[in-house]
């Protein structure tokens, strides 16, 4: 594994990526890993999205990488052979199973690792938790056009979970970081090697610090809300319990804005879930309390974290939510549902408030605690920040990832 054109290892990332304005566009944690790898690694990315006709050289941070099409690479008899280690990011898409099948047929599974993102089986189970059956089953105009309502979305997740199950059964090396992803792996595969490696956060979230004196009082920030599993319906229910005590309460949510629309006909684009959110807002008289921010850049996301009095993650399921890690790294007080791997990264009442996902009354109680108990809030924010900066230390996590890749490559040799 030495002296390959000046590199010690040839590394392949298989992921969803494309080129935007001459630079790599992909999931931020993949980009952070790619940008921070040491010079020992020659990096190629094989993408299943917008596959280039020919390999493209592009900048990833201070380094150069190659982007090529996944299909062309795996269909070539020797396309995967030159690499010392192959990393498949995520099991959510069928391409993971397809690549692993090819690796098995060519005797390359030992040098292939699956890097956990989300895991679909729990997502399918908890996707619409707390949403009324009538909302799950109904179709809006948009749903009819797409032939897909909440119930159909759940069925799709279950089908994709079957492909994920097959992918995990084939896996020899698994890179994860939570109790949940390890539990799902063991359901399907008792023999795979499990390597624990934490993520690397986006660069802006390692700098800056929340301050109670400069935040906007009674402002809640939510990083996503468009899908049922993000649990925004629970947060609205909690807001209804809080509005009597905090009439100036604001909920600022990042993502697509389906409410403040310039044209009435755009209502036709609402999913059943978004229509349900609108119904709840109207029922509880919260229209003046909800601020939908639209899609935000990294810097704007950071501004919203720092502006908030509290970050809330009311999801019905997550594996290792980067939004929670970002908030904690900035020292923002956090309230999060006890789902997936949340308790692997935050301790209840010491570093964050953690509650059962459907317990709206506890969600409201802990938001109230953040608003009303200044001393406790500031202490918890400090502790959460210290924990996040340890767990997501860039240098340590990159070193752990690189050592994992070397171990996998040496096993194959």
Image (cartoon, rainbow, N blue to C red):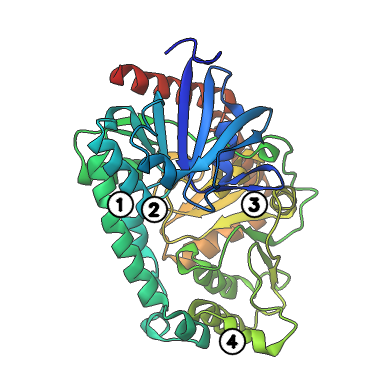
Q: Is residue 356 above or below residue 380?
A: below
Q: Is residue 381 left or right of residue 361?
A: right
Q: Position of residue 293 (x, y in %)?
A: 71, 65
Q: Element under label 2?
A: loop
**Residue 350 in view, yes or no:** no
- Marks 4 and 2, Cα distance to the nearest angstrom? 29 Å
In three-dimensional space, the C-alpha distance between marks 1 and 3, rounded to whole angstroms, equals 44 Å
Query: Which of these two is toward me, 201 or 213?
Result: 201
Which one is in front, 242 or 132?
132
Crowdedness of circle 3 by 10 Å Cα count: few (<14), some, many (20+)? few
Rounded to the nearest angstrom, the CA distance separating label 2 from label 1 is 6 Å
Q: Residues within 10 Å of mark 4 (few under 14, many from 20)?
A: few
Q: Provide residue 172's location: percent of width, then percent of height.
A: 26, 33
Q: If you read the primary sequence from the N terminus, does the residue marked by circle 2 or circle 1 appear first?
A: 2
Mark with earlier residue (1, 4):
1
**Few, some or many C-alpha atoms within 10 Å of disc 2 (few <14, some 14-19, many ≥20)?**
many
Q: State the residue lying farthest toward the top.
A: 3
Find disc 4 in the rendering and name its residue. 268
Q: Position of residue 272 (x, y in %)?
A: 49, 81
Residue picked out by circle 3: 373
Mark 1 = which residue?
Answer: 164
Q: Identify the image quadrant of residue 265.
A: bottom right
**Mark before the other along the chain sequence, 3 or 2:** 2
Where does residue 19 sit, x and y in percent of width and height? 63, 46
Disc 3 or disc 4, which is closer to the eye?
Answer: 4
Which secondary structure, mark 3?
A: loop
In the image, is residue 159 above or below residue 342? below
């Amino acid at each position: 594994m030495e002296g390959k054109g000046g590199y010690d290892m040839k590394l392949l990332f298989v992921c969803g990526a494309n080129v935007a304005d001459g630079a790599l566009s992909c999931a931020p944690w993949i980009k952070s890993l790619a940008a921070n790898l040491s010079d020992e690694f020659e990096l190629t990315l094989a993408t299943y999205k917008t596959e280039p006709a020919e390999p493209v050289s592009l900048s990833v941070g201070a380094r150069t990488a190659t982007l090529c099409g996944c299909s062309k690479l795996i269909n070539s008899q020797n396309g995967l052979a030159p690499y010392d280690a192959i990393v498949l990011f995520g099991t959510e898409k069928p391409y993971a199973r397809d690549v692993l099948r090819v690796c098995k047929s060519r005797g390359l599974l030992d040098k292939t690792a699956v890097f956990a993102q989300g895991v679909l089986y729990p997502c399918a189970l908890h996707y619409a938790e707390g949403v009324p059956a009538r909302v799950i089953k109904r179709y809006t105009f948009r749903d009819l056009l797409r032939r897909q309502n909440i119930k159909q979305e759940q069925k799709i997740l279950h089908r994709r979970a079957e492909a994920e199950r097959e992918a995990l059964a084939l896996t020899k090396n698994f890179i994860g970081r939570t109790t949940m992803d390890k539990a799902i792996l063991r359901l399907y595969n008792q023999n795979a090697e499990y390597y624990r490696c934490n993520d690397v956060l986006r660069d802006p979230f390692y700098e800056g610090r929340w301050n109670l004196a400069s935040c906007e009082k009674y402002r809640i920030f939510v990083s996503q809300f468009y899908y049922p599993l993000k649990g925004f319906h629970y947060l609205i229910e909690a807001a209804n319990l809080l509005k009597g005590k905090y009439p100036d309460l604001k909920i600022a949510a990042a993502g697509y804005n389906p409410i403040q629309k310039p044209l009435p006909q755009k209502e036709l684009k609402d999913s059943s879930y978004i229509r349900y959110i609108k119904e709840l807002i109207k029922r509880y008289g919260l229209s003046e309390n909800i601020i939908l921010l639209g899609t935000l850049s990294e810097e704007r996301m950071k501004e919203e974290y720092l502006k908030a009095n509290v970050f809330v993650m009311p999801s019905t399921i997550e594996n290792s939510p980067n939004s929670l890690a970002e908030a904690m790294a900035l020292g923002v007080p956090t309230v999060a549902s006890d789902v997936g791997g949340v308790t692997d990264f935050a301790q209840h009442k010491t570093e964050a408030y953690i509650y059962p996902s459907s317990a709206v009354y506890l969600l409201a109680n802990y938001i109230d605690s953040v608003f009303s108990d200044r001393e406790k809030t500031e202490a918890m924010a400090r502790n959460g920040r210290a924990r996040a900066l340890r767990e997501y230390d860039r240098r340590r996590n990159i070193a752990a990832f690189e050592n994992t890749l070397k171990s996998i490559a040496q096993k194959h040799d």
